Image (cartoon, rainbow, N blue to C red):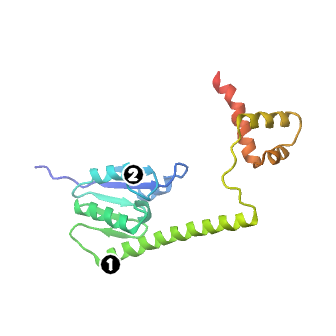
Amino acid sequence: MTRHIGKKLGYARVSSTDQNLDRQRAALGEVDRLFQEKQSGAGRGARTALAELIDYARDGDTVAVSSMDRLARSVVDLNAIVAELVAKDVVVEFLAEGVTFRPGAADPFAEFQLNIMGSFAQLERAIAKERQTEGIRAAKARGVYQGRPRRLSAADVAQARELVDAGVPKAEVARRLGIHRSNLYRALDAAAAVPAASH
């Protein structure tokens, strides 16, 4: 029976589609197979790349992750995922923290680090969220919080175009419509591109 030659597997994750995975890929270096996704780490349900990684990994493989918070957003999930992989005789490496988990080699210090670092990451996220909420509350109290940028309707864009063509400054047009100038520029550019795209 041919013995499985261990592979180096990489896992990279960012929370949203506008974030970039390049830095994590660079940190991981050369891998035999890379599993990557743009998905929130809050829950495992929608993380298809993580599910594929766990299903694919086998005895002798090494899973490399740039940092603990890329693998999970909570200490409970972090422990569960690492335990699941180690139970399959897979080595798990966290590069930023310099911590490695090996099958059959219980390391109390590594487990302690896993819990402590995971807890710190979870706490930092909670504090950041709380600060954001407090900032919004304070901005609302000052009357300067505007929430999400207002989306212009087709009629708004047509009106804006008429005003701009009539010589009204774009800054003034944006003020009248209650939006930021950059949003007006984008709306006008998008409207101008539609006829060209339809030909």
Q: What element carries label 1?
A: helix
Q: Is residue 31 above or below residue 118?
A: above
Q: Name the residue under label 2.
A: 47
Q: In which quarter of the image is residue 102?
A: bottom left
Q: Where is residue 125 in the image (x, y as percent from the top left)?
A: 51, 67
Give the class, few, some or many, for how many residues have Cα within 10 Å of label 2's Cα (few <14, many ≥20): some
- Image position of 36 with respect to 63: above or below: above
Say if mark 1 contacts mark 2, CB within 8 Å.
Answer: no
From the image, state whether disc 1 or disc 2 is nearer to you: 2
Asked if residue 106 lies left or right of residue 35, the reply is left
Q: Is 74 on the left or on the right of 141, as rendered?
A: left
Badge 2 element: loop
CA separation in Å, label 1 and label 2: 29 Å
**Which of the two discs, 1 and 2, labels the residue nearer the N terminus?**
2
Q: In this view, does 174 lie above or below 160?
A: below
Q: Mark 1 points at which residue?
A: 109
- Name the residue located 32 percent from the left edge and 78 percent from the top edge: 109
